[in-house]
Image (cartoon, helix red, strand yellow):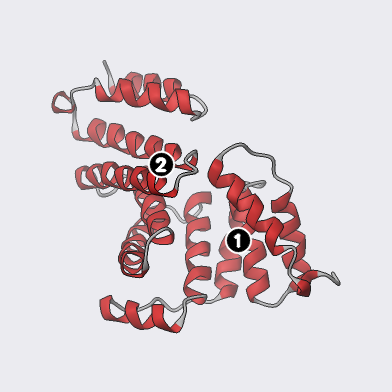
Amino acid sequence: MASQELFEELDKIAGNLDLEDIANALKRADEIDLKELEKSEICGILRRKGEWVYALSNYQEDKQQRYKHLEEAYEFALEGHKVDENDFECLKVLCSTAGRLAEESGIQKKIHYGFLFKSYLDKAIALNNNDFETLHMRGRFSYTVCQLSMIERLAAKVIGKIPETSNKEALEDLLRADQLVPGVAENQLFIGKTYMAMSDWKNAKKWLKIASENKTYVAVETEYVEEAIDLLQDKKLAKF
């Protein structure tokens, strides 16, 4: 089967990435003998498996199980990246998984995955600097770096140099991402959080309210909506 036909078949099976579609797509991908494929085809399969397992993690309410899925997704994407270091879509999955692993880890792994994330993100943006996901991730990363505690900063300096960034740069990327793909609760939440960090309470309330009004049944997305609802209770937002 030609690679394009194979990818179209797999993408059709994956459908809208609900749980059943993901399970069926992974089962079909596992049936494919990678040894019989060209490098670009191998990368395409591994990237998709990483993407699907990452999507699977979003449905997990159990944090330990979610973390295991993220680790598995990271390994699939990393294997694909080793096959083709210039595959943009594979780099995006690497960024997504490394970033999420950093967020859901203790301080040592948080820093480890954080530096990996930044390395992959720089490579991805060098290939395409007008993509929703990479802009969101860079904005989110900038925001997160700005919020690091003194202990986290000291621990990070042992591994490498902390990137110089600002909440203003975070906001620019997040707003640009929203222009490309409006209506994403995760991005809306971080726009609101960045405005809060900048003490712009009016805009913070506006964006947190928008994020809080999203309707979803996906576990991770529900957490973003609930966080926005919780943040709206901040007394500093009351008068706006």
Across and down, in percent, residue 10 comes to 37, 23
> Of the residues shown, which amino acid type is indicated by label 1?
Phe
Up-down: is 61 above or below 147? Answer: above
> Of the residues shown, which amino acid type is indicated by label 2?
Tyr
Which tag, 2 or 1, sits closer to the chain's start?
A: 2
Residue 156, by quadrant, is bottom left
- Look at the image and tell me in which quarter the N terminus lies: top left
Left or right: residue 45 versus residue 127 is: left
User: What residue would you read off at disc 1?
Assistant: 190
User: What residue would you read off at disc 2?
Assistant: 54
Q: Nearer the viewer, residue 33 or 135?
A: 33
Across and down, in percent, residue 34 comes to 18, 28
Up-down: is 185 above or below 175? Answer: above
Q: Residue at x 75, y 65 (%)?
A: 233
Q: Residue at x 42, y 58 (%)?
A: 104
Q: Residue furthest right?
A: 239
Q: CA distance from mark 2 to mark 1?
A: 20 Å
Across and down, in percent, residue 95 comes to 38, 54
